[in-house]
Image (spheres, rainbow, N blue to C red):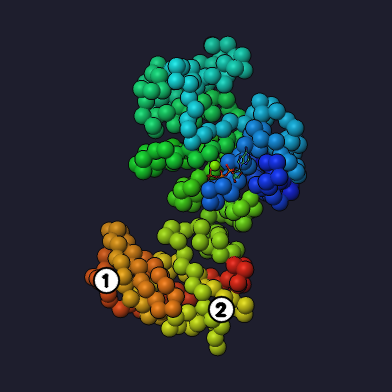
Amino acid sequence: MADMTFRDVGKSFGRTEVLRDVNLDVADGEFVVLVGPSGCGKSTLLRMIAGLEPISTGEFRIGGQLMNDVRPRDRDIAMVFQSYALYPHMSVERNMGFPMEIAKAPKAEREGPVRGAAETLGLTKLLDRLPRALSGGQRQRVAMGRAIVRDPVAFLFDEPLSNLDAALRVEMRLEIARLRKRLGTTTVYVTHDQVEAMTMADRIVVMEGGLIQQVGTPMELYDRPANAFVAGFIGSPKMNLLDGTPAEGGLRIGSAVWPAPPGTTTLGIRPEHLSLEPTGLPPLEAELTVIERLGSDTNLFCEVPGIGTVLARVPGNVDLSAGAPLSLSPRPDRLHPFDAQGVRTGG
Ligand SMILES: Nc1ncnc2c1ncn2[C@@H]1O[C@H](COP(=O)(O)OP(=O)(O)OP(=O)(O)O)[C@@H](O)[C@H]1O
Ligand SMILES: [Mg+2]
């Protein structure tokens, strides 16, 4: 079993605390995605799982076994980095078999797993090439192949696709999804890409400033962010977070009063949940300032007096131009209320 548990795990570099109170359970076979702003401690957490970085406080277990003092090579975990870290003078075949070579497996024993991984990743015809004669996507596949060959108890990925162009990223994302279905290996995956996080994760862990902010399925985080940070972080384009003033019946935002539990100071509404049609709640009166036509959708950047910029996203194309007055109505079941500390107050 390769379930992982973190109990009150913390990490300091000298006097600088970079992770604290990490409490997390990853189930056997689960695919967990870590997201958060740069410097929040994602790579550090991965490195602690791999054993490349000592754990300062707390307990980390794999399959119930305490790992704090277990050496990296005895943890049986494969890590794939953003920089593919291939050996430039070794062929694809040797790069992929290298972990087994280090483990002193004879060549005959290495061949099967390497061929199998190459087959899975579409690298069979490239086995004799050197890394410099490969495209970025092919190099990334070799790095993944090297991880698979070991048949590890868990995979760790640190932004593995961020060096690829958009089309290749989509391709590799599907590749990883297929692999994952086939292998069913416990995986912790770090990314900055919203789409990767939303589509690949069983659960997403949102981190900020060394703390876990929320853990949940992609839809739990999208539908019910626990605080304003998660609300703003999950979802693209970002949720509008509108500060209001208490009023009879809820919170006053610009020209409208929207329902809100007591203590609410901010209402969040995602761009896709603002409508140009009436929704039953009073609309925000706004002026269209910038229009972005994406084909499938249109982004309407609006100016709301006393509030600032509000983004609405409507399906298809709309016949509007900058300067037009707009009435933006929120879907009533899609308002997210937060207090002055950013904590969700209900809904
Ligand atoms: N060896 C180290 N010594 C001191 N501080 C470090 C060390 N490694 C990382 N840090 C600090 O720990 C914090 C977390 O770094 P980490 O690399 O885990 O962030 P990250 O979430 O992976 O960021 P990014 O998205 O930019 O990769 C940062 O503030 C970083 O400066
Ligand atoms: Mg990092």
For ligand 2, give the image quadrant. Answer: top right
Name the residue tied to disc 1. Answer: 322
Q: Mark 1 falls on what kind of element?
A: loop
Pinpoint residue 345: horizontal percent, then vertical percent. Answer: 61, 72
Q: Is residue 222 left or right of residue 9?
A: left
In the rendered image, which quarter contains the N terminus?
Answer: top right
Pinpoint residue 56: horizontal percent, then vertical percent. Answer: 73, 41
The residue positioned 70% from the left and 41% from the top of the image is 14
Q: Amino acid at mark 1?
A: Ala
Which circle marks residue 260 in the picture? 2
Give the image quarter of residue 74.
Answer: top right
Q: Amino acid at mark 2?
A: Ala
Q: Residues within 10 Å of mark 2 (few under 14, many from 20)?
A: many
The residue positioned 27% from the left and 76% from the top of the image is 324
Give the image quarter of residue 149.
Answer: top right
Q: Residues within 10 Å of mark 1 (few under 14, many from 20)?
A: few
Q: Judge whether residue 167 can be spotted in this image.
A: yes
In the rendered image, which quarter contains the C terminus?
Answer: bottom right
